[in-house]
Amino acid sequence: MEPLIPARAQAVAVIGCLALFAFVVELVRKRRLKEEYSILWIAVSLGTAVLASWGGLLIGITRMVGAVSANSVIFFFGLLFLAALLLHLSVRVSGLSEQNKDLTQELALLAGRLQEVERPENGL
Amino acid sequence: MRILAIVPAFQEEDAIGQVVKELHDAQPALDVLVIDDCSRDATGRRAREAGARVLTLPVNLGIGGAVQTGFKYAVARGYDAVVQVDGDGQHDPAQLGRILQPLREREAHVVIGSRFLDDTGYQASPARRLGMRLFGAVVRAATGQRITDTTSGFRALDRQAFSFLARNYPVDFPDAETLVLLRRAGFDLLEVSVRMRPRASGRSSTTPLRALYYPFKQLLSIGVVLMRKPPESQEVPWNR
């Protein structure tokens, strides 16, 4: 039987995934990415590497979910992952903007207080 | 009764001085706090020169974030009541007495100055009227109370109400949503008729895009408020 993925494409895919993995680890090492977020990316890069190097696994998953083409399985789970990631980031941004608002207000209140202490004759 | 006037202002250097002066003239006992929402003009300086206390936000938060800063200030300084007055001169300080009177007599926790309760000569565009009617219907359905002017920013709140809003307040378009929020938390709302003026100068923060976005955001927010558990006002409402 014809292999599902040509050997050369397989090699490129595995190398790409490992490069992503190395890049994520490097980001964490330089403290530019929090460990908390790196777990997801490490899982994806390693998971994709496994899928790329082990064609039978993808076929098995395709049969299991009842899909016709292995390609659509890859795209489906890929999109699902991206959508989940974006939603997660939106949640984080909402939290951050709330914190940002509270900090801004607190800063204005403290600056007012400070001015009052330094120059009581002027009021605020 | 110690009362604080909270005046949110963004780029209102031409109007703010007059607003502060009129507030002092109308109610000499009133403390005036201007929240300068990161204006790039002389809004803060003009307000200070006119005798107001000024808090300057280091980044622009929008009207809701600015007003909430005032609520937090009022909580920290132990005020008994606050009035919200727009920084553009639309709200006539001569009408303050009408808004504060029911609060003094403890008829309600929140008093809203309405342009529509009586015919006060206020003219709005048809689109705006439609929107206001829609919000009126939604707020009525959500609270069981008829509020004629749900978008009015001319409001007075007692300590319980503003302490509550110091903790929970919508940031971007706080008008109608706040009414539903307050009502759900068990606060009594009351409308009084006030006359409003056309804005003295400056520009409204409304842009065409925002005018389209505004009603959707409001309806969504009200829907979300209704889906949440009623917030706790934490303090026991006073007895009457």
Image (tube, coloured by chain):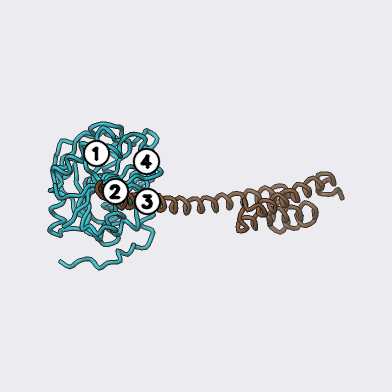
Chain colours: A brown, B cyan
The image quarter containing residue B216 is: top left
Q: Amino acid at mark 1?
A: Glu
Q: Nearer the viewer, residue A51 or B2?
A: B2
Residue under circle 1?
B49
Sooner in the amino-acid sequence: mark 4 or mark 1: 4
Secondary structure under tag 3 reads helix
Looking at the rendered image, the quarter that the C terminus of chain B falls into is bottom left
Left or right: where does residue B237 sit relative to residue A99?
left
Looking at the rendered image, the quarter that the N terminus of chain B falls into is bottom left
Height in image: B159 above or below B203? below
Q: Position of residue B3 (x, y in %)?
A: 19, 53
Left or right: where does residue B35 sit relative to residue B158?
right
The CA distance from mark 1 to mark 3 is: 23 Å
Pinpoint the chain carrying mark 4: B
Residue under circle 2?
A119
The CA distance from mark 2 to mark 1 is: 15 Å
- Which of the two discs, 4 and 1, sits closer to the camera? 1
Labels 1 and 3 touching (C-beta < 8 A): no
Q: Which mark is residue B38?
A: 4
Q: Nearer the viewer, residue A5 or B199?
A: B199
Residue under circle 3?
A105
